[in-house]
Amino acid sequence: MDIQVGPNEKLGGFKLGWYSELSTVERRTFWACFAGFGLDSMDTTIYALVIPSLMATLGLTQPQAGYLATAALLGTAVGGWGGGILADSIGRIRVLQLTILWVAVFTFLAAFANSFSQLFGIRFLQGLGYGGEAAVGGVLISEVVRPPLRGRVAASVQSGYAAGYAVSVALLPVIGSLFPEQFGWRVLFAIGIVPSVLVMFIRRLVPESSVYADAQTARKAGAEAAPFWDIFASAHQRRTLAALIMATGIFGGAYVMITWLPTYLRLTLKLSVTSSAGYLALNILGSLVGP
Protein backbone atom coordinates (compact mmCIF):
# COMPACT_ATOMS: atom_id res chain seq x y z
CA MET A 1 0.00 0.00 0.00
CA ASP A 2 1.38 3.39 -0.98
CA ILE A 3 1.19 5.70 2.03
CA GLN A 4 1.41 9.42 1.55
CA VAL A 5 3.41 10.98 4.36
CA GLY A 6 2.10 14.25 5.71
CA PRO A 7 4.24 17.38 5.74
CA ASN A 8 6.50 18.06 8.68
CA GLU A 9 4.62 20.01 11.29
CA LYS A 10 6.15 22.42 13.73
CA LEU A 11 5.00 23.94 16.96
CA GLY A 12 6.85 27.14 17.82
CA GLY A 13 9.66 26.09 15.47
CA PHE A 14 10.01 22.65 17.09
CA LYS A 15 9.49 19.62 14.88
CA LEU A 16 6.99 17.20 16.39
CA GLY A 17 9.27 14.16 16.12
CA TRP A 18 7.81 10.89 14.86
CA TYR A 19 4.29 12.32 14.82
CA SER A 20 5.18 14.68 11.97
CA GLU A 21 6.20 11.68 9.86
CA LEU A 22 2.84 9.95 10.12
CA SER A 23 0.37 9.95 7.25
CA THR A 24 -3.21 11.11 7.78
CA VAL A 25 -4.42 7.51 8.06
CA GLU A 26 -1.68 6.64 10.54
CA ARG A 27 -2.49 9.68 12.67
CA ARG A 28 -6.19 8.94 12.78
CA THR A 29 -5.49 5.33 13.66
CA PHE A 30 -3.08 6.42 16.39
CA TRP A 31 -5.59 8.75 18.00
CA ALA A 32 -8.38 6.17 17.74
CA CYS A 33 -6.25 3.52 19.50
CA PHE A 34 -4.81 5.98 22.03
CA ALA A 35 -8.22 7.41 22.92
CA GLY A 36 -9.87 3.99 22.97
CA PHE A 37 -7.23 2.58 25.31
CA GLY A 38 -7.29 5.73 27.44
CA LEU A 39 -11.05 5.99 27.80
CA ASP A 40 -11.39 2.29 28.56
CA SER A 41 -8.64 2.75 31.14
CA MET A 42 -10.65 5.56 32.69
CA ASP A 43 -13.66 3.27 32.95
CA THR A 44 -11.79 0.29 34.40
CA THR A 45 -9.73 2.26 36.94
CA ILE A 46 -12.79 3.95 38.41
CA TYR A 47 -13.44 0.73 40.33
CA ALA A 48 -10.08 0.89 42.10
CA LEU A 49 -10.80 4.46 43.19
CA VAL A 50 -14.23 3.71 44.64
CA ILE A 51 -13.40 0.49 46.54
CA PRO A 52 -13.45 2.35 49.91
CA SER A 53 -16.86 3.82 49.05
CA LEU A 54 -18.22 0.43 47.98
CA MET A 55 -17.04 -1.10 51.25
CA ALA A 56 -18.69 1.69 53.22
CA THR A 57 -22.00 1.92 51.35
CA LEU A 58 -22.63 -1.63 50.11
CA GLY A 59 -20.92 -3.38 53.01
CA LEU A 60 -18.38 -5.19 50.85
CA THR A 61 -15.52 -6.95 52.61
CA GLN A 62 -11.91 -6.75 51.45
CA PRO A 63 -12.02 -10.32 50.07
CA GLN A 64 -15.16 -9.44 48.09
CA ALA A 65 -13.45 -6.33 46.72
CA GLY A 66 -10.60 -8.59 45.63
CA TYR A 67 -13.01 -10.99 43.94
CA LEU A 68 -14.48 -8.10 41.97
CA ALA A 69 -11.01 -7.10 40.80
CA THR A 70 -10.32 -10.71 39.82
CA ALA A 71 -13.61 -10.93 37.91
CA ALA A 72 -12.54 -8.06 35.67
CA LEU A 73 -9.10 -9.59 35.22
CA LEU A 74 -10.55 -12.94 34.16
CA GLY A 75 -12.88 -11.16 31.77
CA THR A 76 -9.93 -9.27 30.32
CA ALA A 77 -8.07 -12.53 29.64
CA VAL A 78 -11.06 -14.09 27.90
CA GLY A 79 -11.82 -10.87 26.04
CA GLY A 80 -8.28 -10.61 24.71
CA TRP A 81 -8.45 -14.06 23.14
CA GLY A 82 -12.00 -13.60 21.91
CA GLY A 83 -11.37 -10.10 20.58
CA GLY A 84 -8.43 -11.29 18.52
CA ILE A 85 -10.43 -14.14 16.99
CA LEU A 86 -13.37 -11.84 16.26
CA ALA A 87 -11.09 -9.20 14.71
CA ASP A 88 -9.90 -11.78 12.18
CA SER A 89 -13.52 -12.53 11.31
CA ILE A 90 -15.28 -9.17 11.10
CA GLY A 91 -12.41 -6.67 11.04
CA ARG A 92 -10.30 -4.65 13.45
CA ILE A 93 -12.36 -1.45 13.22
CA ARG A 94 -15.66 -3.15 13.96
CA VAL A 95 -14.24 -4.92 16.99
CA LEU A 96 -12.59 -1.70 18.22
CA GLN A 97 -15.94 0.08 18.06
CA LEU A 98 -17.79 -2.81 19.66
CA THR A 99 -15.38 -3.20 22.57
CA ILE A 100 -15.24 0.53 23.38
CA LEU A 101 -19.04 0.67 23.39
CA TRP A 102 -19.20 -2.55 25.43
CA VAL A 103 -16.93 -1.22 28.19
CA ALA A 104 -18.79 2.10 28.31
CA VAL A 105 -22.20 0.45 28.66
CA PHE A 106 -21.20 -1.96 31.42
CA THR A 107 -19.36 0.75 33.33
CA PHE A 108 -22.56 2.80 33.19
CA LEU A 109 -24.62 -0.17 34.39
CA ALA A 110 -22.34 -0.51 37.42
CA ALA A 111 -23.82 2.77 38.66
CA PHE A 112 -27.09 0.93 39.35
CA ALA A 113 -25.61 -2.11 41.13
CA ASN A 114 -26.78 -2.77 44.68
CA SER A 115 -24.98 -5.97 45.61
CA PHE A 116 -21.76 -7.91 45.32
CA SER A 117 -23.25 -10.43 42.89
CA GLN A 118 -24.48 -7.71 40.54
CA LEU A 119 -21.10 -6.00 40.54
CA PHE A 120 -19.32 -9.33 40.00
CA GLY A 121 -21.24 -10.02 36.80
CA ILE A 122 -20.85 -6.47 35.54
CA ARG A 123 -17.12 -6.41 36.27
CA PHE A 124 -16.54 -9.67 34.38
CA LEU A 125 -18.49 -8.42 31.37
CA GLN A 126 -16.67 -5.08 31.49
CA GLY A 127 -13.38 -7.00 31.46
CA LEU A 128 -14.39 -8.83 28.28
CA GLY A 129 -14.61 -5.52 26.45
CA TYR A 130 -11.42 -4.10 27.90
CA GLY A 131 -9.40 -7.19 26.96
CA GLY A 132 -10.79 -7.16 23.45
CA GLU A 133 -10.07 -3.45 22.98
CA ALA A 134 -6.50 -3.71 24.21
CA ALA A 135 -5.80 -6.66 21.92
CA VAL A 136 -7.35 -5.31 18.74
CA GLY A 137 -5.98 -1.80 19.29
CA GLY A 138 -2.46 -3.20 19.48
CA VAL A 139 -2.98 -5.24 16.33
CA LEU A 140 -4.49 -2.33 14.41
CA ILE A 141 -1.72 0.15 15.18
CA SER A 142 0.92 -2.45 14.29
CA GLU A 143 -0.70 -3.17 10.94
CA VAL A 144 -1.29 0.42 9.90
CA VAL A 145 1.93 2.18 10.98
CA ARG A 146 5.07 1.63 8.87
CA PRO A 147 7.91 -0.43 10.41
CA PRO A 148 10.37 2.48 10.96
CA LEU A 149 7.81 4.25 13.19
CA ARG A 150 5.87 1.29 14.54
CA GLY A 151 7.71 0.80 17.84
CA ARG A 152 7.49 4.44 18.91
CA VAL A 153 3.85 4.78 17.91
CA ALA A 154 2.78 1.51 19.57
CA ALA A 155 4.58 2.53 22.78
CA SER A 156 2.86 5.91 22.73
CA VAL A 157 -0.52 4.19 22.45
CA GLN A 158 0.28 2.41 25.72
CA SER A 159 0.57 5.83 27.37
CA GLY A 160 -3.16 6.11 26.79
CA TYR A 161 -3.71 3.88 29.82
CA ALA A 162 -1.98 6.40 32.09
CA ALA A 163 -3.91 9.25 30.47
CA GLY A 164 -7.22 7.52 31.15
CA TYR A 165 -6.19 6.73 34.72
CA ALA A 166 -5.30 10.40 35.18
CA VAL A 167 -8.79 11.43 34.08
CA SER A 168 -10.47 9.10 36.58
CA VAL A 169 -8.17 10.29 39.39
CA ALA A 170 -8.91 13.92 38.48
CA LEU A 171 -12.64 13.23 38.56
CA LEU A 172 -12.50 11.61 42.01
CA PRO A 173 -12.06 14.75 44.18
CA VAL A 174 -14.41 16.75 41.95
CA ILE A 175 -17.25 14.25 42.27
CA GLY A 176 -16.41 13.74 45.94
CA SER A 177 -16.90 17.45 46.60
CA LEU A 178 -20.24 17.58 44.79
CA PHE A 179 -21.95 14.39 45.97
CA PRO A 180 -22.13 12.43 49.24
CA GLU A 181 -20.16 9.18 49.31
CA GLN A 182 -23.20 6.94 48.87
CA PHE A 183 -23.96 8.61 45.51
CA GLY A 184 -20.53 9.75 44.36
CA TRP A 185 -19.33 6.30 43.26
CA ARG A 186 -22.49 5.85 41.22
CA VAL A 187 -21.90 9.15 39.44
CA LEU A 188 -18.34 8.13 38.58
CA PHE A 189 -19.54 4.87 37.04
CA ALA A 190 -22.28 6.72 35.15
CA ILE A 191 -19.68 9.03 33.61
CA GLY A 192 -18.17 5.88 32.12
CA ILE A 193 -20.69 6.06 29.28
CA VAL A 194 -18.76 8.99 27.76
CA PRO A 195 -16.27 6.84 25.76
CA SER A 196 -19.15 5.60 23.60
CA VAL A 197 -18.93 8.93 21.73
CA LEU A 198 -15.54 7.83 20.37
CA VAL A 199 -17.25 5.12 18.33
CA MET A 200 -18.70 7.77 15.98
CA PHE A 201 -15.22 9.20 15.31
CA ILE A 202 -13.80 5.77 14.54
CA ARG A 203 -16.70 4.82 12.28
CA ARG A 204 -16.40 7.98 10.18
CA LEU A 205 -12.67 8.67 10.01
CA VAL A 206 -10.61 5.52 10.62
CA PRO A 207 -10.30 3.04 7.72
CA GLU A 208 -9.92 -0.71 8.07
CA SER A 209 -6.45 -2.25 8.15
CA SER A 210 -5.16 -3.22 4.70
CA VAL A 211 -3.74 -6.41 6.25
CA TYR A 212 -7.24 -7.52 7.19
CA ALA A 213 -8.60 -6.48 3.78
CA ASP A 214 -5.88 -8.47 1.99
CA ALA A 215 -6.60 -11.51 4.18
CA GLN A 216 -10.30 -11.32 3.32
CA THR A 217 -9.47 -11.12 -0.38
CA ALA A 218 -7.24 -14.18 -0.07
CA ARG A 219 -9.99 -16.11 1.70
CA LYS A 220 -12.45 -15.31 -1.05
CA ALA A 221 -9.89 -16.63 -3.53
CA GLY A 222 -9.85 -19.95 -1.68
CA ALA A 223 -6.98 -19.51 0.78
CA GLU A 224 -7.46 -21.16 4.16
CA ALA A 225 -7.13 -19.16 7.36
CA ALA A 226 -4.34 -20.24 9.68
CA PRO A 227 -5.66 -22.19 12.69
CA PHE A 228 -5.59 -20.27 15.96
CA TRP A 229 -3.30 -22.82 17.61
CA ASP A 230 -0.59 -22.12 15.03
CA ILE A 231 0.77 -19.48 17.40
CA PHE A 232 1.96 -22.38 19.55
CA ALA A 233 3.52 -24.28 16.63
CA SER A 234 7.26 -24.91 16.80
CA ALA A 235 8.02 -21.96 14.51
CA HIS A 236 6.26 -19.49 16.83
CA GLN A 237 6.21 -21.27 20.17
CA ARG A 238 9.23 -19.61 21.76
CA ARG A 239 8.12 -16.09 20.86
CA THR A 240 4.52 -16.72 21.90
CA LEU A 241 5.45 -18.13 25.31
CA ALA A 242 8.01 -15.38 25.97
CA ALA A 243 5.45 -12.69 25.17
CA LEU A 244 2.81 -14.45 27.28
CA ILE A 245 5.08 -14.72 30.32
CA MET A 246 6.26 -11.12 29.98
CA ALA A 247 2.74 -9.73 29.60
CA THR A 248 1.47 -11.79 32.54
CA GLY A 249 4.19 -10.48 34.83
CA ILE A 250 3.93 -6.86 33.78
CA PHE A 251 0.16 -6.67 33.69
CA GLY A 252 -0.30 -8.72 36.85
CA GLY A 253 2.07 -6.57 38.87
CA ALA A 254 0.65 -3.31 37.56
CA TYR A 255 -2.92 -4.46 38.14
CA VAL A 256 -2.27 -5.23 41.80
CA MET A 257 -0.72 -1.79 42.30
CA ILE A 258 -3.46 0.08 40.46
CA THR A 259 -6.27 -1.83 42.18
CA TRP A 260 -5.13 -1.62 45.80
CA LEU A 261 -3.00 1.51 46.07
CA PRO A 262 -6.02 3.89 46.32
CA THR A 263 -7.55 1.72 49.07
CA TYR A 264 -4.24 1.55 50.95
CA LEU A 265 -3.89 5.34 50.85
CA ARG A 266 -7.47 5.92 52.02
CA LEU A 267 -8.04 3.18 54.60
CA THR A 268 -4.57 2.38 55.93
CA LEU A 269 -2.80 5.75 55.72
CA LYS A 270 -6.07 7.63 56.36
CA LEU A 271 -5.40 10.16 53.60
CA SER A 272 -8.15 12.37 52.23
CA VAL A 273 -9.44 11.96 48.69
CA THR A 274 -7.46 15.01 47.56
CA SER A 275 -4.21 13.84 49.17
CA SER A 276 -4.66 10.35 47.74
CA ALA A 277 -5.10 11.82 44.27
CA GLY A 278 -1.79 13.65 44.65
CA TYR A 279 0.10 10.44 45.45
CA LEU A 280 -1.62 8.59 42.63
CA ALA A 281 -0.56 11.35 40.24
CA LEU A 282 3.08 10.40 40.83
CA ASN A 283 2.33 6.80 39.88
CA ILE A 284 0.48 7.97 36.79
CA LEU A 285 3.34 10.25 35.75
CA GLY A 286 5.72 7.30 35.70
CA SER A 287 3.24 5.26 33.66
CA LEU A 288 2.80 8.12 31.22
CA VAL A 289 6.47 8.69 30.41
CA GLY A 290 7.57 5.05 30.74
CA PRO A 291 6.43 3.86 27.29
Image (cartoon, rainbow, N blue to C red):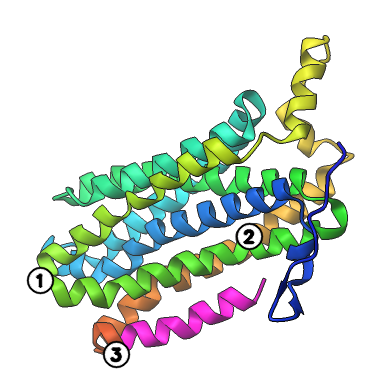
Marks 1 and 3, the one that precedes in the sequence: 1
Residue at which label 2 appears = 157
Three-letter code for the amino acid on which mark 2 is drawn: Val
Q: Is residue 226 visible?
A: no
Q: CA distance from mark 1 to mark 3?
A: 21 Å
Residue at which label 1 appears = 180
Q: Are marks 1 and 3 in contact (CB under 8 Å)?
A: no
Marks 2 and 3, the one that precedes in the sequence: 2
Image height of 261 relative to 8, above or below: below
Marks 2 and 1, the one that precedes in the sequence: 2
Q: Residue at x 78, y 55 (%)?
A: 6
Residue at which label 3 appears = 269
Image height of 32 relative to 267, above or below: above
Three-letter code for the amino acid on which mark 3 is drawn: Leu
Residue 29 position, x and y percent, is 65, 48
Q: CA distance from mark 2 to mark 3?
A: 33 Å
Q: Quadrant of residue 149?
A: bottom right
Could you tell me which secondary element the residue under label 1 belongs to?
loop
Q: Is residue 233 visible?
A: yes
Residue range in magenta is 275-291
Q: Is residue 289 magenta?
A: yes
Q: Residue at x 44, y 82 (%)?
A: 281
